[in-house]
Image: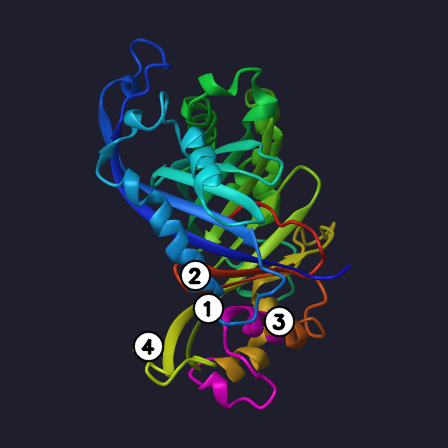
Amino acid sequence: MSDLLFLTSTARFEAARSLSMLPEAHRGRRLHGHGFVVRIRTLFPETGGSGTEVADLRQRLSDTVAPLDYCLLNDWLPQPTDQHLAHWVWDHLQTSGIKMAGIQSTPHAGADIDHHRHTHSWCSGTFESAHRLPHVPPGHPCGRMHGHGFKVMIHANRDLSRKDPATFDHDPLDASWQSLHRQLHGHCLNDIPGLENPTSEMIAHWIWLRLNSDLPGHSWVTVQETGSSGTMFDGTHYRIWKEFSLDSAVRRMGIPRQDPHPRIYGHTFTLRLHLTAPLDAVLGWTVDFGEVKRLFHPVFTLLDHHPLHERADLEQTDCASIARWIKNRTLPLLPQLDRIDLYETPGCGVILSCRGHTPALPV
């Protein structure tokens, strides 16, 4: 399969709203406000190559949501729920090839519209627990008892969970998570039936199974073990991701001499490698997070704290070109590589799908 390349961008706005379609006693019926985060993903233009695609999409998205900033959203939408706002952004953004639009209304909840125009509501939570992995090789640090502040995200496809998705809010997701939180928080995970080998993959699988009865239409579960690593499980497939930070210099290509933007500048890039592989029946994981870091290290050292525009094998230093370069260098080392996310600023960059399919919604 050929690669698929996507642009991704984010914007913010502050606004008030009232949701009269919620039950009478629901807090969301009262006038209230949020700091909203908007996310968008589009296909990379076939005629692309100017190096300004990321900045151009960021500007178009900012211009689209600017009318919503510091306003009453009910003046724009009768029921300005997260999902209706996401559809509004999709319909009003003046760009082609949209594959995802999302609204995050609080730090712990939001709604995303996928490429089928299905709405996925999500909520997130945390739990603090200890664990050890009993089947790792001798000397592996995860074989020792240790702990994490885990982060969990639960997604539900609302088009499958209810006949009338317009009446759905985040409360069912929150209620499902609170029940699981009581079972996980403040415990040694190895002592919980079904989590005798509590890898991130097994924790995601454990949560998935328990959501089957409580949350019809749940899409997938994400378990973030550390700030730089996590696992997604959709009921069939496992995907892990490992995140890196790159401090690199780049050069803007093909700009007029009078352009006020500097020719040489830089970013703290956020790079996320996604890998997909069958679950190892003994170890209970797909790929060891530490092994991903070790195998990727030779590529990392070529990028971090370097002027990328001086590399002879990297003609352009825009996000798309760098992501393709990383893929070509990394696949021989990590054949499980499924997707590369590269952001030059938070939420703004490219996603390269190495297996030629539309990637899952954002982690």
Q: Quick check: marks 2 and 1 in contact, CB under 8 Å?
A: yes
Please determine whether, in this image, residue 104 is positioned above or below residue 226.
above
Secondary structure state at the residue bearing disc 2? helix
Mark 2 = which residue? 56
Amino acid type, callout 2 = Asp
Q: CA distance from mark 2 to mark 3?
A: 20 Å
Q: Quick check: marks 3 and 1 in contact, CB under 8 Å?
A: no
* Figure quadrant of residue 86: top left
- In magenta, the rendered stretch is 304-325
Q: In which quadrant is the N terminus drawn?
A: bottom right
Q: Residues within 10 Å of mark 2 (few under 14, many from 20)?
A: few
2 or 3: tag closer to the N-terminus: 2
Mark 1 = which residue? 52
Secondary structure state at the residue bearing disc 4? loop
Mark 3 = which residue? 324
Secondary structure state at the residue bearing disc 1? loop
